[in-house]
Image (spheres, rainbow, N blue to C red):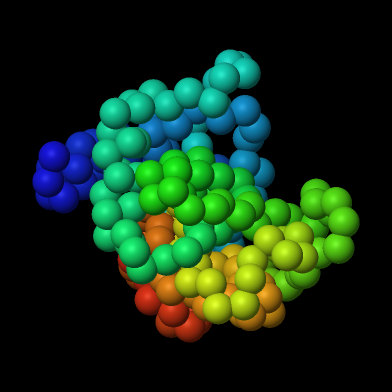
Amino acid sequence: MDENDLKQQIDTLIRSYPDFPSKGVLFRRVNLIICLSLIKDKLSPRVSIILFNDILKDVLPLFSKPTLVHSLCCYVANRYKNKIDLVAGLEARGFLFGPIIALELGIPFVPVRKQGKLPGPIISASYQKEYGKDVFEVQQGALSAGQRVLIVDDLLATGGSLHAAEQLVKQTGAKVYANFVVIELGDLNGRKVLGSEVDAFLTY
């Protein structure tokens, strides 16, 4: 499957729901995945589109379109083959794509988690959200100095969370090679706050 076909097929899975969760917001629902918890993040009125993961009462981390998800992750892996040493996925939706990309490349995956969820010594970086501050953490020793890191998340909006992840990687002495996201909200220009390349599969 070529890149354009892959983009078209993924794009057809995205549904828009006006005025949800609040009036003036266009809710984009991506039916690529099945997850176990409802994402409760609230975005400011200037955020016109949000990405949301499907929710089902199923304990298995299945994909609704596994072949398509695998094709996407293989596409990303091929783009970064022999260019990166490690994949870092942001909690929580970066965990769905990052491990598959890392597995395809045969390189480590490191979860970037929210505060208080990792045992042992940690390294942290805070970032401002529309409704307060949040903190990302990784375990000490998870990344090594000089490693080339691909940061993976599902969505680039204002860029705050990816920027914090970049700072976290730099604290370890590793280097951010690029940020990969499935969707970028272009009107928000979140890439302007990032210090590394942004690779967005789809832009709205």
Q: Nearer the viewer, residue 23 or 38?
A: 38
- Residue in front for this viewpoint, 73 or 22: 73
Q: Position of 115 compared to 79: left or right?
A: right
Image spot of residue 178 (x, y percent): 42, 71
Spot occupied by residue 57 in the image (x, y as percentages of width and height): 60, 17
Is residue 12 found left or right of 44 in the rendered image?
left
Residue 55, image quadrant: top right
Which quadrant of the structure image shows residue 72? top left
Measured as percent of width and height from the top left, residue 173 is found at 63, 80
Q: At x 60% / y 46%, what residue is drawn? A: 92
Q: In which quarter of the image is residue 160?
A: bottom right
The correct choice, above or below, for 67 with respect to 21 in the image is above
Where's the C terminus, which quadrant? bottom left
User: How many labels, in total?
Assistant: 0
Visible residue check, residue 78: yes
Q: Can you give x and y, in whole percent of width and height, for residue 87 in the image?
A: 50, 58
Q: Look at 44% across and 79% down and name the residue there.
A: 196
Residue at position x 19%, y 43% in the image:
6
Image quadrant holding the N terminus, namely top left
Q: For this rendering, which residue is in front, 159 or 27?
A: 159
Q: Residue at x 55, y 45 (%)?
A: 95
